[in-house]
Amino acid sequence: MVISQALPPQNIEAEESILGGILLDPEAMGRVVDLISPEAFYVQSHKEIYQAALRLYGQGEPTDFLTVKSTLEDYNLLEQVGGLNKLTQLLDRTVSAVNIDRYAALVMDKYLRRQLISAGHEIVDLGFETSQQLEIVLDESEKKIFALTQKRPQEGLIPLSDTIIKTFNELEKLHEQTTLPGIESGFYDLDAITGGLQRSDLIIIAGRPSMGKCLATNSEIILADGSLATISDIYHNRQAKLLTLKNNFKFSLTEPSHFIDDGIKPVFRVTTKLGRYIETTLTHPYLTIEGWQKLSQLKPGNKIAIPRKINIFGTQKIPDYKVKVLAYLIGAGCLTKKSPLFTNKNPLLQKDFIKYVENFKGIKIIKDDSRERRTSSFYISGDLDLIRNNRQKFADSLKKIIKSQNLSNQKLADILKVSVSSIYNWQKGICVPNETTFYNLCEILKVDSHELDPYGIASIRNNGKNSLTIWLEELGIWGQTSRHKTIPSIVFTLKRSLLALFLNRLFATDGWISVLKSSQVKLGYATVSEKLARQIQHLLLRFSVIAKLKKRSVKYKNNPRQIWQLDISDSQSIKSFIEEIGIFGKEKAIDLAKESLNNKRYQTNCDLIPIEIWKQIALAKGDESWSSLGKRAGIKSYSNLHVGQRALSRNRLFKLALALYDLSLQQLATSDIYWDEIISIEYMGEQQVYDLTIPKTHNFVANDICVHNTAFGLGVAANIAKKENLPVAMFSLEMSKEQLSMRLLAAEAGIESNRLRSGRFVQNDYDKISIAIGTLSSLPIYIDDAANITVTQIRSQVRRLLAEKKGEFGLVLIDYLQLMEGAGSENRVQELSKITRSLKGLAREIKAPVIALSQLSRAVESRNNKRPMMSDLRESGAIEQDADLIMMLYRDEYYNPDTVDRGVAEIILTKHRNGPTGTVKLIFQPELTKFLNMQNSSNYS
């Protein structure tokens, strides 16, 4: 970097010409007083002379030679400025004051350049202030530069004749109702109350977050490490890496940007044909072949998307013997008696179980087959002989360590706070310390516990639980009855091979595989525990195995008994199971099933694309005949494709998609989605619900079902850009710029957003889309979709846009307030208070309205009258204080589906600093996310 050593920018001659002109011409001062200030003069003496002239001008006195001389003498400044000689020189060097305003502009130019240099030095100093937060330093630096750009010569006195004519023109427009004091919002009833959106106002638009698109608290979500967490856990942990469905119908990992507690709401259980279920609010969207649809729009028979595979495995490793024993005990064990019990009639499984359970130290296997024809059982208890041997080893090791450290029994007893006789008995092997004392002993002696007891405390205690029981307790499954058995959390995080091993031994207990005379292969598993069955169903999905869960009644000891049965019928799923999992002890049946499957052509009646896909294929093919398309696609029965009558297989859809060169259809044919049919929708009462904001894709997988996660503020912003042709800056912290563009396009073109997103629009829609794109492209709308943004960053971007446009600003829209980041050094209420004050300051600085969308608290849900009030604003104190206008959205249809106000939205003005409050009604079109005036209007939403 090169720093100039030259003098700062100045124009001494121009300064002298200005002062000489003032001394020479009595009218000159009036021409420059609004153009230049004393600080603009580079020479100090010039500054003092101009200040004296300015003082005289302010008092109505002349600014001639003698009067200025006298004023300088009065303030003892005449000698400092150079005496009479200086004033005389100024007069002598000035011929005329005719160009004095031009000289003033030259002096101001140099002054601003000097100010720029000074600001630069101050910014350098700020850069070295490492104690200040970087964000504050950047804001202060920008403020210094921006302040220079705003220094403009004042307009000065304007003739009343000019002013009165302009005033009359404004009055005439107001009388004719062709203009408003503020900026038109595009909704005339709202503008009638507010007089338009006033410049320098902070406006809050509030509504319930996500319109109630929430999941019940116990909904389970698979995480990147293979573990399962409820949405409640994720909300409280404030972090997660989970699955989301991308636009190409493939799953990938993502992280929520925000976590929402949406209070207590009515929830409904959606159960599918495969036996899966999820509980959500009625407004929660599900993915259908025709796009995302709210639950309230769905009914039994509709098909929704679920994953057909979840390719997520953990990295956890535990010894193979533990994996096998755990599977055996969950499948055919008893976990409620004094010791674990395994019961199975298959000698091969008995032998396998015994082989691997013996790896647990300090245990003894007792076979019980006392009753005739009774299936053999195996109790796992502590081995007393082994325990005695281990205890003696412990005693010998303890005695040796105490001696090596020169510790007396008394001193050790005092430290441990036990009797001396206890220390003596431990060294003789008569007894052992309890678990807490044992680990305190290890800590005092500074030895690893394995040095005293290599196999764990259970291996040396007579009255303690054996090592297997202790491990089952640690896993959290000891004491579970058959009906309440579950798979412990550690299994979900196992690496792929260990998880396959677990399922292999689990199916060996209560699973089956067989080949019927019809060559059909039957594969399944049965249990009396619903939770266990659902967990197995989920784990199978990780290996691309789709299982159907159903409840059955069977006879058990001559009494009916409810069981949960998993059936795997799709041949591709069975192949995947055989190749990756298998069943120990049923190898012969596995080989027969494999042979049967290899001799059959693949057909499926379940993994099909819903029948509605024919509409999209019809749009893609255009005027071509179906038989021609089928022939080009290489389909044998091309003359009869059963168009619109049968669901399509993936293979057939892929052939058609290739023939049509249609990428979206190809992606659908090879997608990670299985289209499962809804069989029931049941009301489950009111429950705590949560939601997650997923950047860009806005969906995630819960309970192995794909579920989804601004319209009025967006409509106001678009109206201003369209009607006023003023710049609008949108800061979307929740939605991506592509999603905002799609909403704007759907509203402008009048085409349902679902059809646009899925590409299912007809040829006639192209004209509407083209016109809408042309209109929107010409609008001065600017979007920033950064998920985390501060007021400082918003102010910086708005300043740059304002400087670039060099004119009036239309609007700043922020979606939404609660997602904005603060300084992070205070509690959230204080942070939000600073944010709202800063936004109000921004509105005054740019002389344009700033709209911030905000959330309402869930308190509104607990009242009979759901219309929001001021107190329902989250962190309402700070917002209420700083906002000039607060508007709240309410749709009665959302709470009362049978209301007479269907399709009507209320805009409730709860605060209006400069006018009346009240309620405005608008038409709301949810399929377009569009608001309209109640009467016929061409207003943009």
Image: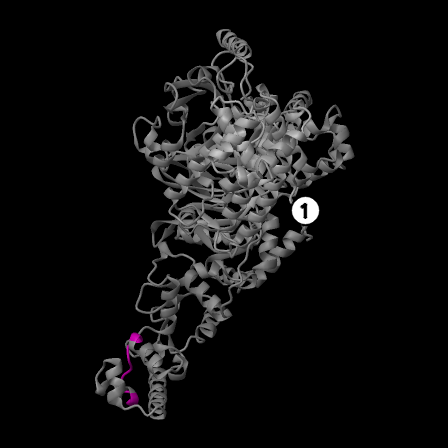
Query: Can residue 399 be spotted in the picture?
Result: yes
Q: Position of residue 469 (x, y in %)?
A: 36, 69
The answer to which image quadrant residue 189 occupies is top left
User: Which of these two is toward me, 934 or 187?
Assistant: 187
Left or right of residue 591, residue 357 in this image: left
What is the magenta range? 427-436
Query: Can residue 292 be spotted in the picture?
Result: no
The answer to which image quadrant residue 441 occupies is bottom left
- Report which residue position mark 1 lands on: 601
Q: Position of residue 452 (x, y in %)?
A: 37, 83
User: Which of these two is toward me, 797 or 193?
Assistant: 797
- Tell me if residue 87 comes above or below residue 393 in the rendering: above
- Image point (58%, 19%), residue name: 723
Q: Position of residue 565 (x, y in %)?
A: 45, 49
User: Which of these two is toward me, 520 or 93?
Assistant: 93
Left or right of residue 622, residue 753 in this image: left
- The 10 Å Cα crowd at callout 1, few under 14, some 14 to 19, many 20 or more, is few
- Image point (34%, 32%), residue name: 872
